[in-house]
Image (tube, grey):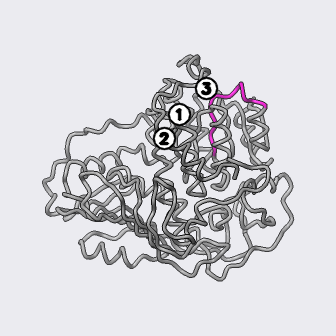
Amino acid sequence: MNLSRRSFLKQSALALAATNVAMPAFCESKNPNEKLNLAFVGVWGQARETMANMRSENIYALCDVDARRLGMAAEVYKGAKHYADYRKMYEELANEIDAVIVSTPDHSHAPASVQAMKMKKHCYCEKPLAHEVFEARRMAQIAAENHLATQLGTQPNAYNNYYEAEELVKSGAIGKVKAVHVWTCTGNTTGYVKGVGGNVDVGMPLGCGWGQDPSQTQPPEQPVPAGLDWDLWVGPAKKLPYNEVYVPANWRRWWNFGSGQLGDFGCHYMNLPIRTLSLLNAKTVKTQGPAVNKWACPEWLRVEYTFHSANEWAAPGITLNWYDGAKIPEMEAICAEHKIPYRGNGILFIGTEGDLYANYNEHILYPEEKYADFKAPDPFIPRSIGHYKEFLEAIKQNNPKLARCAFSYGGRLTETVLLGVVSYRSGTSFEWDPANFRTDSPEANEFLQRVYREGWSL
């Protein structure tokens, strides 16, 4: 890293104080009715949905380290410029693009985003915002310094269902929230993953969700497929030999590139309680899981967070609890105790007066007999104009606040999620000091950031 922690903290303080930063000049001169020139770093997977939802603008440049994927995207977005290395794309198109959309594997989110934002390009980045806690804080800092429109790619943040659930909590329908339970239950997967050409047999058993068995060792080296620039794919991470088990999707199972089930779904599911109850300052974090594997993410994980602060709808001592795995007996027992049907995933608010279950598309108050005649409050939280449109309008209207999952919020959301990873990997429970960016555990502090390979920086 070329930024010391002392400098980082000092710059963070200055960024927070700079509330009247002017918009970059190129943004001020942009005609609100003019189409934006968008550059995409990563063109497969979730990027395809994002590009489809931003087709109202100019899909100006495409960047991917896989020539086959790049070629397939180019067939859809004819006329776009093509690159394998986003650093070269930024250098050559610095005066031509307005915003960058980052849809790479997690380990490349931060460097790709930070470099773009340092060039005063607005930035959309898929969840989780970063691979390391330090990266998430740094990304929020750079966005604030440059007064940029940003958006974290957690699409349910814009769903009406989430707003309706939030309004129930904030109307006092379940009293004060004592605890929140968030869980994703995933069965055993096969040794196949869907790639560009269909299902690919990766030649080894795969664990539950995005986890692996604790005995998993480093995969052996295999020949790199034609058209894949493996060195660029690895980017800032530790250089490991290529194996088909990493690409195209299973990188989420390996610490070098992903953060397991918690990293993949934490920002989606934990977002609703964190935004509703203002749980942005974790105080303590403790985890339980299988034996830590230095290479691979776990097949199951439990995390308990407490918080320095919350809002008036949270009871003192509120906890946020995360569970993932093929079977989650804890949540089955909690649901049974509260006479709530158990489902394979969801969010459960335990209140002093009642309970609220929610997922992406539904929410239900319990006990059902108590709320049989309950009338939901009239809507009092303005609804989203659309997750992707928020970002585009924030740019066009020179108003970063229009993007409701901006890095100022999405960064702290990601920090909370990734602190669970830090606790598990370090084998320690700890107290978190968000202002000074440290824990009271030396072992945990070692996992807050990592050293990049030469040629990559923040």
Q: Where is residue 395 shown, x and y percent of the image?
A: 53, 28
Q: Residue at x 19, y 44 (%)?
A: 377
Separation of disc 3 and disc 1 at Cα?
A: 13 Å
Q: Quickly name the residue at label 1.
A: 149
Q: Where is residue 268 shown, x and y percent of the image?
A: 46, 54
Q: Count residues near mark 3 (Cα–Cα under 10 Å), then give few for <14, some for 14-19, many for 20+.
A: many
Callout 2: SS: loop
Compared to residue 118, the image places residue 223 above or below, namely below
Circles 2 and 1, Cβ within 8 Å, touching? The answer is: yes
Q: Count residues near mark 1 (Cα–Cα under 10 Å), then give few for <14, some for 14-19, many for 20+.
A: many
- Residue in the foreground of this view, choosing between 259 and 21: 21
In which quadrant of the rendered view does residue 132 lie? bottom right
Q: Quickly name the residue at label 3.
A: 36
> Taking 188 as reference, is 348 left or right?
left
In which quadrant of the rendered view does residue 255 lie? bottom right
Callout 1: SS: loop
- Magenta range is 92-102
Q: Count residues near mark 2 (Cα–Cα under 10 Å), then give few for <14, some for 14-19, many for 20+.
A: many
> Taking 244 as reference, is 14 left or right?
left
Separation of disc 2 and disc 1 at Cα?
A: 7 Å
- Residue in the foreground of this view, choosing between 383 and 369: 383
- Residue in the foreground of this view, choosing between 40 and 258: 258
Q: Residue at x 60, y 57 (%)?
A: 131
What amino acid is found at the position of numbered circle 2 in the picture? Ala
Instruction: Please tell me which of labels 2 and 1 falls first in the chain.
Output: 1
What amino acid is found at the position of numbered circle 1 in the picture? Ala
Residue 235 magenta-highlighted: no
Callout 3: SS: loop
Report the disc number at residue 406. Answer: 2
Compared to residue 280, the image places residue 30 above or below, namely above
Mark in the foreground, 3 or 2: 2
